[in-house]
Amino acid sequence: MDEDGCFSFDEGATVQHLYKALKIPLPLRFLINCYVNSQVAGLNQKLRDGDIVSVLGTIAGG
């Protein structure tokens, strides 16, 4: 991650690659909501130059 909080990946990188770069453990990856350009993204979603990615933990309450 650079000083602006941005990552650089090779072409063909996916959300899964981002999770690995963020060191999110595999069991927790299914508890996290990921959005690419404001659209829900799965682990196999390919990332492109300029994409805006939001990673949010699941919140539950009652």
Image (tube, grey):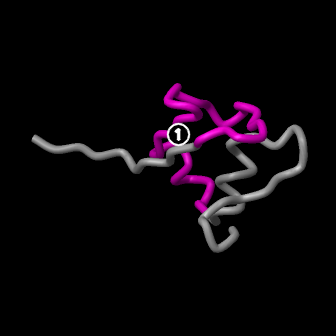
Where is residue 53? Give x, y as percent: 58, 43
The residue nearer to you, when weighing 31 against 18, is 18
The residue nearer to you, when weighing 59 against 54, is 54
For the C terminus, the image quarter is top left
Rendered position, 19 above or below 13:
below
Q: Magenta includes 50?
A: yes
Q: From the image, tell me which residue sits under label 1.
A: 34
The structure residue drawn at horizontal position 60% and vertical position 65%, both measured from the top left corner, is 5
The structure residue drawn at horizontal position 90% and vertical position 42%, both measured from the top left corner, is 11
**Element under disc 1:** strand
Where is residue 28? Give x, y as percent: 51, 53
In this rendering, would 51 be left or right of 17? left
Where is residue 30? Give x, y as percent: 52, 42
Q: Magenta includes 49?
A: yes
The magenta span reads: 24-52
For the residue marked with disc 1, what is the amino acid? Cys
The residue nearer to you, when weighing 26 against 17, is 17
Residue most extreme to the top:
39
Residue most extreme to the left:
62
The structure residue drawn at horizontal position 66% and vertical position 60%, both measured from the top left corner, is 6
Q: How many labels does the image show?
A: 1
Where is residue 57? Give x, y as percent: 40, 50
The structure residue drawn at horizontal position 70% and vertical position 31%, both measured from the top left corner, is 45
